[in-house]
């Protein structure tokens, strides 16, 4: 059976990574979290005390980043120079800075090159903001996953609270709206729904329901490829 390439885009907190990871598991595909790559660049930049406004230095750090993404115990493991940064790239501080780093053209070029290499063998679920529109425009299935801002902020609050962070829902709502704005309004590969993407609003859906919708689309697609009319 043809191994599909599945692109899942959408704003922060829509459930992309959870849904993408489960879809990949169910299909025995590789899951690629493209946001983790921009977060790893942001982490490296902060570790080297480079200001995110110093574009040249940030691009240099992105190009020379020794990044590896592996999958272990159902979780993506992100390694920079062999150091496991999977947790450190998800702190509120990195979340606040990452959109600024991700809008730099040279950073995006370096990451997109890597993302295309990783997807080149098919059998891949990749989530992000520009996967269906820019990174993998020929993806077999494109999903635009979204949810109301209130629900997305609530989910992020829950996620951070579970990890022991004390954050206010109000601040988180502001941070997420701010990231949405930067991601949607940037000049290069902004967050928009691809014309051929299927919209799934997860505000009132469980993870399981969203996963099942995507798996149904995959089934339709593969049976269409096997029985072309
Ligand atoms: O999905 P996430 O929250 O981990 O993404 C982190 C940031 O990276 C987010 O602000 C948008 C950016 N990003 C991007 O610009 N393009 C992608 N393909 C993935 C993420």
Image (cartoon, rainbow, N blue to C red):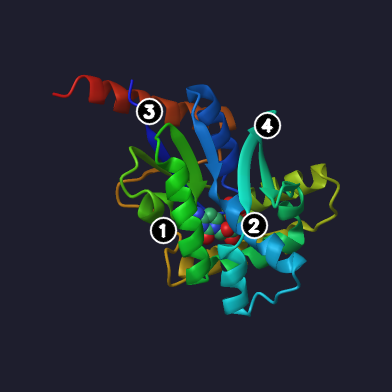
Q: Position of residue 90 (x, y in %)?
A: 72, 52
Under tag 3, what secondary structure? loop
N-term-proximal mark, 2 vs 4: 2
Ligand number 1: quarter of image: bottom right
Residue at 62 percent across and 46 percent down: it is 68
Distance in Å between CA atoms under marks 4 and 1: 31 Å
**Label 3, residues with CA under 10 Å away: few <14, some 14-19, many ≥20:** some
Q: Quadrant of the N terminus?
A: top left
Quick check: marks 2 and 4 in contact, CB under 8 Å?
no
N-term-proximal mark, 3 vs 4: 3
Per the image, the residue denoted by label 1 is: 192
| Res 3 label | 3
Quick check: marks 4 and 1 in contact, CB under 8 Å?
no
Taking the image as shown, residue 75 lies to the left or right of residue 200, namely right
Distance in Å between CA atoms under marks 3 and 4: 22 Å
Q: Nearer the viewer, mark 3 or mark 1?
A: 3
Residue at 62 percent across and 59 percent down: it is 65
Under tag 1, what secondary structure? loop
Q: Quadrant of the C terminus?
A: top left
Distance in Å between CA atoms under marks 2 and 4: 19 Å
| Res 72 label | 4
Q: Nearer the viewer, mark 4 or mark 1?
A: 4
Residue at 55 percent across and 26 percent down: it is 25
Q: Position of residue 118 (x, y in %)?
A: 47, 43
Quick check: marks 3 and 1 in contact, CB under 8 Å?
no
């Amino acid at each position: 059976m043809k191994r599909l390439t599945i692109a899942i885009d959408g704003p922060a907190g829509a459930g992309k990574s959870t849904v993408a990871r489960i879809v990949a598991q169910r299909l025995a595909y590789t899951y690629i979290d493209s946001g983790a790559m921009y977060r790893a660049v942001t982490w490296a930049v902060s570790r080297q005390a480079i200001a995110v406004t110093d574009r040249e230095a940030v691009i240099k750090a992105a190009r020379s980043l020794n990044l590896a993404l592996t999958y272990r115990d159902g979780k993506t493991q992100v390694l920079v120079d062999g150091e496991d940064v999977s947790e450190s790239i998800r702190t509120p501080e990195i979340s606040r800075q990452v959109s600024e780093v991700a809008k730099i053209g040279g950073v995006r070029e370096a990451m997109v090159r890597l993302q295309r290499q990783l997807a080149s063998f098919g059998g891949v679920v990749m989530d992000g903001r520009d996967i269906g529109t820019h990174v993998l425009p020929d993806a077999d299935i494109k999903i635009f996953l979204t949810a109301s801002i209130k629900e997305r902020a609530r989910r992020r609050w829950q996620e951070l609270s579970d990890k022991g962070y004390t954050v206010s829902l109000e601040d988180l709502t502001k941070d997420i709206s701010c990231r949405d704005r930067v991601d949607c309004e940037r000049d290069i590969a902004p967050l928009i729904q691809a014309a051929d993407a299927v919209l799934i609003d997860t505000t009132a859906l469980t993870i399981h329901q969203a996963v099942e919708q995507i798996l149904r689309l995959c089934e339709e697609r593969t049976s269409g490829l096997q029985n072309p009319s």
